[in-house]
Amino acid sequence: VSVDLAFASLAEARRMLDSGEASSVELTRAALAQADRMVPHTNALALRLDERALTRAEAADGRRAQRSTIGPLDGIPYTLKDIIDVADIPTGAGSRLYEGNVPTQSATSAARLEDGGAVLLAKARTHEFAWGGTTLPARNAWDPDRIPGGSSGGSASSVASGIGTFTLGTDTAGSVRSPANFNGVAGLKPTYGRIGRSGVVPLAWTLDTVGVLARSVRDVAVVYDEIAGPDPLDPTSVATPHEPVAGAVEGGAEGLRIGVPDAYFFETIQEPVARTVQQGLDALADAGAELVELTLTPPEAVDSALVAAFVLIGAESSAWHAEWIDTKADLYGEDVLHYLRMGRALLATTYIDAVRCRQLAVECFARAFEQVDIVVTPGHGHVAPRVDEETIVFDRGEPEGRDAAGVRNLTIVNLAGLPGLIVPTGLAGELPAGLQLIGPPLSEGLLLRVGAAIEDRVGHVGRRPPLAAG
Amino acid sequence: LYAIRRVYPAASEQGDESVSESSEQSNEQPPEELAATLGALLDQTVSGDLRRRLEPEPSFAAERAWSVVKSRDAQ
């Protein structure tokens, strides 16, 4: 089975399906062969669905033979983070607490993919209840001695390995973008409410989003169009109809003003990562964008974002898990139980202060976007840490804890409810690094357009992790 | 979990042990102490004028929050 087939872009896969060069069954078999090859190294999948996938692939091939395909994802293999429900398929949420949990309804996002004929290969590992940044025992696709990031670590590692053309994850404090950056794939966290949350095990209601990961920005755009839009089952869903963005992704970055923050985001960065990030900034300039030094104000908005989000997640998650924290404590992982107990101990006034800090974050970016079209930051200042590396050392500044460093540039985007896009810009040594693009609410199309312009110039798309290359 | 000492240098410099824990220490702090630390940090941030000015929006929605800020800034 061809490794090339497993790594085909969405556009290539559709062309092959349309021309008869490959069938959906062949695409699916190629993806499953990559799972056979990579999962012994990465442990990235929680549940394989080989038989179901091949049955659905045969059905997609049948529709194509009868010229009755049902959308751009018909017959395309993918994976889902294992906190997103699909009817009659177990959702494990990475927890012993959810053993035997089989939902009867699909999440709105998953239902749209299933209704569109996409072929679900597997449920991908998540950090337990999405409450963490390592997703162990899953491993990074580029180096199995390193973490994949989290909490959508299984999703990112899988799609980087050629297991599916795309995957869905969730992002509450950076959980799509962090693993996307560590595994060298594109990852979109949409505006809060733009993709329905119904049918997704919640971590923190006021921050949770469903996001898309794929090996290119262009592939992300197509999938995003299929699942974005009002969700009648999600009370926080954005009511505005979704305007498709994939058709405008070739628009380039000419004339756009790109804000480069003059503090915080570039303060802690390792030299090899800085060089790779600079390639992305150079690509933006080459595409005709104007890079503008930007001061984010008030500074308290940036400085307080991590703590404020930690408080919101702690309080909201402990409210959701409330009765189990005592009655089923032995079924939680030690780290998650610790944070749930912390959340239960927070004062109501502390939660309110965190909500106030969220308003500061909104103010901060509202003012920024009066000066620039988008803001750009490094995804991380470091590459994916080794499994035993609990402290990240930077060239300057103090060392940071692994989990804090994993989301320090990302979480404020959740706090402000904004869209954020990870665009890989190359390898720092032998490991991926990239940029984060941040835009105003509902500017996903603009971010994807700029991301594609970067992607065209840095030459990362098409690189494969050494173990996955075949 | 969070690099509190670096994010909040002023708190550390004040020598207040309750708000000077470094990131990895937070994993080892008892949950109640960690909650108190976080509360102290946010209390320090949301002080003075900010406490009076920032009206919390518990039923947060991105579009609504956005329009509130834009409207207020325009006044």
Image (cartoon, helix red, strand yellow):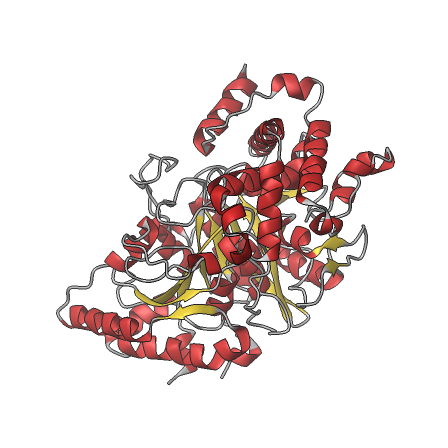
Occupied quadrant, residue A184: bottom right
Q: Quick check: A312 left or right of A3?
A: right
Looking at the image, which residue sits at the far left? A66
**Residue A319 in the image, given as x and y percentages of width and height:** 50, 39
Name which residue lies at 54% across and 46% down: A326
A174 over B17 or under it: above or below: below
Residue B26 or A75: which is nearer the viewer?
Answer: B26
Q: Position of residue A287 (x, y in %)?
A: 55, 53
Determine if residue A410 is in view. Answer: no
Instruction: Say which of A98 and A352 sits in front.
Output: A98
State the quadrant of the N terminus of chain A: bottom left
In the foreground, A236 or A464: A236
For residue A44, above or below residue A352: below
Image location (x, y in percent) of residue A222: 36, 56
Residue A82 lies, in percent from the top left, at 42, 60
Q: Residue at x 16, y 72 (%)?
A: A62
Q: Residue at x 28, y 57 (%)?
A: A87
Q: Nearer the viewer, residue A297 or B21?
A: B21
How many marks on residues? 0
When the figure is inspected, residue A244 is found, relative to residue A71, above or below; the finding is above
Image quadrant in which you'd find residue A110: bottom left
| Viewer can see residue A302 | yes
Q: Is residue A412 left or right of residue A152?
A: right
Of all residues shown, which one is farthest toward the front?
A327
A330 in relation to A256, above or below:
below
Residue A431 appears left or right of A238: right
